[in-house]
Every structure is written in structure tokens, then in C-alpha cells.
Image (cartoon, grey):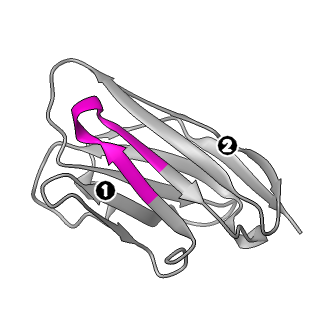
């Protein structure tokens, strides 16, 4: 079994910053990508960004591009989500997900095999 644990959520004022961390551990596995998704009350889960290990690149949703940055360490199966210039509309539960496959698009939840429990991010206006 693979465990995925997020940390770093909290309450911040608009314009502020937060850094989320995600670590995956457990049985031997090889991840191909680690992604961040978020879900606000009454809304569907949406893609935020992903770190693709094969290309060592990160991709982002348009809504966070230029404000959020993903970094990570593939050897540690760890990723970070640095969130700057936060807006009230960024308020959501943020989930980290791990993919062990190459098939499927990285921005779709179906690509991912393991999920964390989520961490709450609240941005006040």
C-alpha cells in the first residue's frame, strides 16, 4: 500500500502565500507524476498542477499559472506546491495524487492511483 500525506494548509489573507508539501511512501513503487488537485464546496475536483518526473517539468492550470509553483524530488517521492498571490477563489481542499502509469493525461484525476486525504486552504478577503 502507498500512503500519500499532505501538509501545510491553513488560513491566509488575500495576497499572501502558503506552501503545501506532499510525501508518498509505502511499498516499493515508481511514480511517473505527482499532481495537485483542489475541490471547493459544491464544486468538482479540479486540476491545479503536476510534476512530471520523466521530463522534470511542471504543468499548471490556467487559473494558477504565474502564481503557483510545483517542485519536487523524485527520489523521495515528494512534491511541494508554493502558492503566492492567493485569492479568495483559491479556497478549497487541496489533494495530492500519485501516478505510477504513463497512460492518461496528467490533468485528469483518472491518471492517478493514490490520493492523500487533503489539506484545507482558506483565503480570506
Position of residue 123 in the picture relative to residue 90 (left or right): right
Q: Does residue 58 appear in this view?
A: yes
The quadrant in which residue 57 appears is: bottom left
The quadrant in which residue 91 appears is: bottom right
Q: Secondary structure at mark 2?
A: loop
Q: Which mark is residue 9?
A: 2
The image quadrant where one finds the C terminus is bottom right
Marks 1 and 2: in contact by CB < 8 Å? no
Sort mark 2 into few (<14), some (14-19) or many (20+) by Cα contacts within 10 Å.
some
| Main secondary structure found in the magenta portion | strand
- On whether residue 75 falls in the magenta region, the answer is yes
Residue 45: x and y in percent read 50, 61
Q: Is 58 in front, or is 122?
A: 58
Residue ID at (70%, 57%): 17
Q: Which mark is residue 51?
A: 1
Magenta segment boundaries in residue numbering: 70-80
Position of residue 34 in the picture relative to residue 32 (left or right): right
Position of residue 20 in the picture relative to residue 85 (left or right): left
Q: Does residue 2 appear in this view?
A: no
Q: Secondary structure at mark 1?
A: strand
Residue ID at (40%, 31%): 23
Residue 86: x and y in percent read 71, 67
Residue ID at (20%, 17%): 27
**Would you place residue 69 above or below residue 18 in this image?**
below
Residue 38: x and y in percent read 54, 58
Q: Earlier in the sequence, mark 2 or mark 1?
A: 2
**Would you place residue 73 above or below residue 109 in this image?**
above
Amino acid at each position: 500500500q502507498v500512503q500519500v500525506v499532505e501538509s501545510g494548509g491553513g488560513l491566509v489573507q488575500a495576497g499572501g502565500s502558503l506552501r503545501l508539501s506532499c510525501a508518498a511512501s509505502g511499498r516499493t513503487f515508481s511514480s511517473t507524476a505527482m499532481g495537485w488537485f483542489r475541490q471547493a464546496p459544491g464544486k468538482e475536483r479540479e486540476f491545479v498542477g503536476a510534476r512530471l518526473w520523466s521530463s522534470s517539468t511542471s504543468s499548471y492550470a490556467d487559473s494558477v499559472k504565474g502564481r503557483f509553483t510545483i517542485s519536487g524530488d523524485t527520489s523521495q517521492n515528494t512534491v511541494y506546491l508554493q502558492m503566492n498571490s492567493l485569492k479568495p477563489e483559491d479556497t478549497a481542499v487541496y489533494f495530492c495524487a500519485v501516478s505510477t502509469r504513463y497512460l492518461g493525461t496528467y490533468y485528469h484525476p483518472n491518471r492517478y492511483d493514490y490520493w492523500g486525504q487533503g489539506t484545507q486552504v482558506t483565503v480570506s478577503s
